[in-house]
Image (cartoon, rainbow, N blue to C red):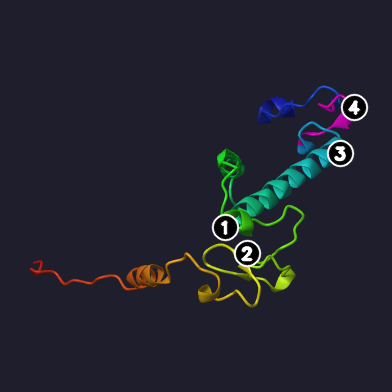
Amino acid sequence: MEHKETGCQSREGPILCINNCGFFGSVATMNMCSKCHKEMTMKQEQAKLAASSFDSIVNGNVAGNTEVAVAQVEVKTLIAQPADVAGPSEAAMVNPKGHSRCSTCRKRVGLTGFNCRCGNLYCSLHRYSDKHECKFDYRTAARAAIANANPVVKAEKLDKI
């Protein structure tokens, strides 16, 4: 009688796990047994961790709060680039084994390498822009930074009433 008055409905009998493992599930664990629910949450956490680490590798940053769809789109653009381009960009590419080398002299630099604004890695001898034929335009970048930091302020020509 109390169930009819309050509107609550009770299930008839125990709920079996939705993964058909033979154990009983509960509403708190999304109709799964505790073992299946724990495995599902572990898989979701590992997928999130893998997506964030993959995204940080693709984008080159540590921010892990971006969507997985963005990482998949960027992977497609990286694959679509031609692989037979010759020139200094090949020397700048990091070896797949993880050995970091100077883009000019190919010396192993390890953790002591210097990243330039042109996007390459250099040893202590070639770290300055005049030592490695840097293509980055420092003057234009400085002008843009100053322009962004100091917006133009103009007064009204007529006073508003």
Which amino acid lies under the numbered mark 4 shown in the image of this protein? Cys
**How far apart, in angstroms, are the residues tagged by discs 2 and 4?**
57 Å
- Measured as percent of width and height from the top left, residue 16 is found at 85, 25
Q: In which quarter of the image is the N terminus?
A: top right
Residue 2 drawn above or below residue 47: above
Image coordinates for residue 59, horizontal then vertical, percent: 59, 53
Residue 18 lies in magenta, yes or no? yes
141 or 99: which is nearer to us? Answer: 99
Q: Which circle, 2 or 4, is nearer the viewer?
A: 2
Closer-to-camera residue (49/18): 49
Distance CA(mark 3)–CA(mark 1): 56 Å
Label 4 – label 1 distance at C-alpha:
58 Å
In x, y percent, where is residue 27?
A: 77, 34
Q: Which mark is residue 21?
A: 4
Q: Which mark is residue 103?
A: 2
Residue at the image position 68 percent from the left and 49 percent from the top: 54
Q: Which residue is drawn at 71% across and 68% down?
A: 107
Disc marking residue 75: none
Query: Distance between the Cα atoms at labels 1 and 2?
Result: 8 Å
Q: Mark 1 points at which residue?
A: 88
**Alpha carbons under labels 4 and 3: distance apart:** 11 Å
- Tell me the kind of residue under disc 1: Pro
Check contact, mark 1 vs mark 2: CB within 8 A. yes
User: In the shown orientation, is residue 38 left or right of residue 147?
Assistant: right
Q: Residue furthest top?
A: 12
Q: Which of marks 3 and 1 is nearer the N terminus?
A: 3
User: Which residue is denoted by mark 3 in the rendering?
Assistant: 34
Three-letter amino acid code of the residue under disc 3: Ser
Q: Nearer the viewer, mark 4 or mark 1?
A: 1
Q: In this view, does 1 lie above or below 99?
A: above
Look at 88% across and 38% down and name the residue there.
35
Q: Which of marks 2 and 4 is nearer the N terminus?
A: 4
